[in-house]
Image: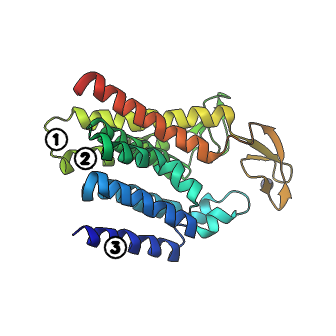
Amino acid sequence: MDSFFIGGIIFLCILSVHYRFLTIKGSITAFFTGLFIFLSFGWKGLIILGLFFLTSSLLTKWKKKQKQDGEACEEERYGRTAGQVLANGGVALAAAIFHLFLKDSVWLVVFVSAFAAAMADTWASEIGILSKKQPFHIKEWRKVDKGLSGAVSWLGTFAAIAGAAIIGTSCYYLYQLESVHMIILIIFAGFIGNMADTFLGAWFEQRFYCSVCKKETEAAFHCKTKTVKVYGFSWFTNNIVNFLCTLIGGIIGGGFYLWLIH
Ligand SMILES: [Zn+2]
């Protein structure tokens, strides 16, 4: 039975390269993430991972033309890289390894909370960007162009809650939890992780200005021209922000679980 699931993970990784959801290195990283999650949390863990991976891959491809800003970089054309896989799944992978050796249920909560945060963040950005209204920037306290880090919209906020809620309710049914407190905790952890992502992105991610179309962007090239940096740190990449988002989600979920439920 184990070889059936492991074979399934390999098959999906190959398929992901074929459909350009993942690069080859991204796919190898995803394989080890899937393997440890399976060894530690069984097929139920794979369902949580699958929910995140499937919905985020499809959302990224959905209305892609409408979302595109600047020239598509390598990552966008060939799928998610190993760095992007670890940014979204690294905390969950670490939780799976800890759970494998320590067997404490808190690591399961850290695992699902990290995915709830990754889910909330991906749903918020991929759906929020389609909002018809201009989003509001939490640091600059004004309306900005769509797609910038630190910008929030009602649509994005609802999408974040919906994304985290899918992970929360799936856990409730998968693990036949007796109380709804766990669903609320997982949604809360996911949402806080997503908020941390927004705040960190607003303060530290790089912002550029395109002199051709007079728009602010996060792309180094826009309208076939090199853009001018406005602020931000070059080392504070989107992967670091996403990793911190899942880490904070995991810590909030695991922390409150130990404090209130365990
Ligand atoms: Zn431009």
In this rendering, the answer to whether 47 lies above or below 87 is: below
With 246 as the anchor, is 76 left or right in this view?
right
On whether ligand 1 comes within 8 Å of the CB at mark 3, the answer is no
Task: State the residue in front, 137 or 105.
Answer: 105
Report the number of numbered marks: 3
> What residue is at 47 percent from the left and 37 percent from the top?
247
Q: What is the CA distance from the residue labelled 3 to the residue labelled 1?
A: 30 Å
Q: Secondary structure at mark 1?
A: loop
Q: CA distance from mark 2 to mark 1?
A: 8 Å
State which quadrant residue 20 falls in: bottom right
Residue ranking furthest to the top: 259
Which numbered tag is attached to residue 1? none
* Mark earlier in primary sequence (2, 3): 3
User: x, y percentage for residue 133?
Assistant: 57, 44
Q: Image point 60% across, 43% down: which residue?
A: 240
Marks 2 and 3: which is nearer the front?
3
Q: Position of residue 241 (x, y in %)?
A: 58, 41
Q: Which mark is residue 7?
A: 3
Give the residue pinned by disc 1. Answer: 177
Instruction: Look at label 3 and name its amino acid.
Output: Gly
> Label 1: how many residues lie within 10 Å, few (<14), some (14-19) or many (20+)?
few
Q: Which residue is mark 2?
A: 171
**In the rendered image, which quarter contains the N terminus?**
bottom left
Which quadrant is home to the C terminus? top left
Is residue 229 in view from this perspective? yes
217, 31: nearer the viewer? 31
The residue depicted at 77 percent of the width and 47 percent of the height is 215
**Could you tell me the amino acid type at mark 2?**
Cys
**Callout 3 environment at 10 Å: few (<14), some (14 to 19), or many (20+)?**
few
Residue sitting at x 71%, y 42%? 235
| Residue type highlighted by circle 1 | Leu
Q: Disc 2 vs disc 1: Cβ atoms closer than 8 Å?
A: yes
